[in-house]
Image (tube, rainbow, N blue to C red):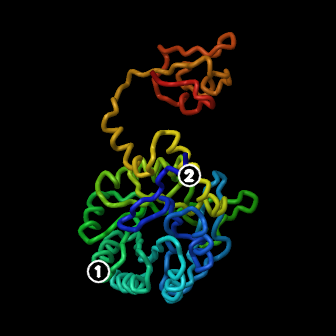
Amino acid sequence: MSAQINMCVDLAGLQLRTPLVLTEGPLSGSVESIRRAARHRLGAIITKGQRPEPAKSPNPYIFQTREQSLINADWSDMGYTAWLQAVPVLKTDLPVPLIASVAKNYVTPSVAAEQAEALSEAGVDGVTLCDYNVPALIEAVRLARPRVKCRLFAKLIPFIPNLEEVLQALLKAGIDGIAAMDAVGPAMEVDIETGLSTMGSPDGEGYLSGRAIRPLTVRYIYEISRYVNVPVIAVGGVTNAESAIEMLMVGATAVGMCTAPLLHGLEVFDKVATAMERWLGEHGFADVNEIRGLTHRRQAKREITSDKRAAVDMERCTQCGRCVRSCFAAAPELVNSMLVIHTERCTGCGLCVSICPVDALSLR
């Protein structure tokens, strides 16, 4: 069945063999690492953020949190000049599109535009610009657009307050697509045995990525794709097929991963792509593009109500008691090895439904 599923997507004219993208990070920081990644089932690779000069990060700079996400303070890079030399080498045999990431926050908008033009001429398929200074990012896009022949993307930082206005300005400046979002922070975690931060940076801080930020990214992509009709790369918290499908449903064209392959190896791309194919086939979809924006379409028809209450399917229920312990209204009760729902107490919050390990509860 999976062989019949179309996994190809069109990312602003770039043809991707799957919607999965390796995004900026250590796994895309050199010719060797990029070639290694391209052997797996991903559709495109975005280089590590390219700094004007080579840089190294103080150790340690990547650390798994207690919630199995990552905090990183990785600012290392081989430098813009080395990247210009690496691009033609990579493009001789790279089987997927290569997008160069310019760390705009280290240079002026005019210098960023010059770098984007040079990278375009070197042969990259796209350039993405990222900067925590949003007006400077918009100006860099405006200056780069007439000079860059390849696709031009902007990577957005989290929590932009005037998001629609910023997106419209980026569209006017000539952007081809959006990537969102960047890691969240600053963040900090402390080793309680030493009292020291897990990061080797001078102030002990880093930026949080991975599964901990997934719900934030989902909402961000949902909002971005509601405001603009350009391809969106969802970045942040994707670790499995379910979270990748979720990002497509809220409007993403492609889905980026960085933390998951760092924690579990590049094989995660193969596993996620295969699991996505299986899910699509089981749910009657022959093309991965069919689910893009599905949440927008279904949310528009969703009935808003406050009348639903919890109900139990006793054939599924194992009387584990999780719902009893967690209900603040004391609506579920175990009586003679049977789960009883006191509907007059139930508020319909839905917590019990979400924590039931056997899907025995629902709101009706």
Report helix, strand or loop for mark 1.
helix
User: Is residue 69 positioned above or below 340 on the image?
Assistant: below
Q: Position of residue 180 (x, y in %)?
A: 42, 61
Q: As drawn, which residue projects farthest toward the right? A: 193
**Could you tell me how many numbered marks the image carries?**
2
Kind of residue at disc 2: Ala
Residue designated by label 2 = 212
Q: Position of residue 251 (x, y in %)?
A: 38, 51
Report helix, strand or loop for mark 2.
helix
Residue 143 has which mark? 1
Q: Identify the residue at image location x=62%, y=16%.
A: 339
Quarter of the rendering occupied by the C terminus: top left
Question: Can residue 184 be seen here?
Answer: no
Asked if labels 2 and 1 touch by Cβ distance under 8 angstroms, the answer is: no
Crowd tier of the residue under label 1, counting other residues whose Cα lies within 10 Å: few below 14, some 14–19, many 20 or above: many
Q: Identify the residue at image location x=64%, y=67%.
A: 62
User: Is residue 191 positioned above or below 241 on the image?
Assistant: below
In the image, which is nearer the foreground, mark 1 or mark 2?
1
